[in-house]
Image (spheres, rainbow, N blue to C red):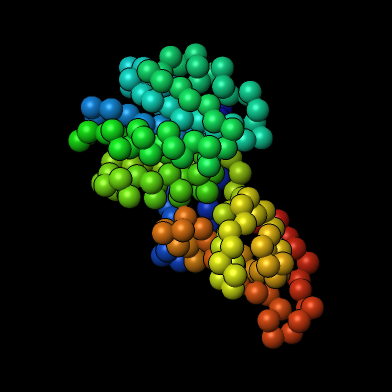
Amino acid sequence: MGVTDRMSKFQFPESIRSRPVYGTLEPRPGKAHLMIADAEGAEALIDLAAQDADLIHAAHIIYIPKNTGETYVEKLRALAPAQLYVGPSYEASVPRIRRVLSDAHMGLQIYLAGTEGLMGQAMNEAMHAGIPHSAVQTEHRGSVARRMQCVHCKGITEDVMTDPFVCSHCGLNLFVRDHYSRRLAAFQGVCVDAEDPGNVPEPVELYK
């Protein structure tokens, strides 16, 4: 296990069947390679390059730094990928992701790394483009923040780090649940005080 593994990997506790399970990226043969990562997810791509530099040289990397700023950008550039796009947000990167997927030929291998929100949304794009599930690898790195959907107003709150949390759309206090919607790439949040309004537990950081 390398230094970056110790820094940014997190072992999620066992949970219900719908909760995604992540692995470790490994080089695979393919006609093309698309790598999508955010924040510390760059570390997984750097580790992948240490295993197979030629694979990275043939890869199209789409990277969203988020709160890591320039920490990893030059390191990724130094890997000399075939293409490197650094985007300001996942939303801003979606048109490029869709274009790459629409132009893809049989044999494309996809590598997703970083936060659960990034991987879930990128996985959805790949599935909608008809990429087989077996051609997509995932590796969680960095923040354990969740992308949450309020089951009451259907609004999405990004980067949730506490349980319970306040829905950014309707203001309800929501429990963080492990129930996961692959269609929405989001976990589900349910009202904490529906039966006893105002009785809301103190928020605690996820996994603490």
Image location of residue 39, percent across then percent down: 58, 34
Q: Is residue 164 visible?
A: no
* Figure disc tally: 0
Relative vertical location of residue 36 with respect to residue 70 in this rendering, above or below: below
Image location of residue 107, percent across then percent down: 22, 34
Image location of residue 60, percent across then percent down: 38, 25
User: Which residue is at a point 69% across and 86% down the rendered structure image?
Assistant: 195
Relative vertical location of residue 20 with respect to residue 52 in this rendering, above or below: below
Q: Is residue 150 left or right of residue 76?
A: right
Q: Is residue 3 visible?
A: yes
The answer to which image quadrant residue 98 occupies is top left
Relative vertical location of residue 192 with respect to residue 56 in this rendering, above or below: below
User: Which residue is at a point 41% across and 20% down the rendered structure image?
Assistant: 83
The quarter of the image holding the C terminus is bottom right
User: Which residue is at a point 74% across and 84% down the rendered structure image?
Assistant: 196
Image location of residue 180, percent across then percent down: 47, 62
The answer to which image quadrant residue 56 occupies is top left
Q: Is residue 76 left or right of residue 52?
A: right
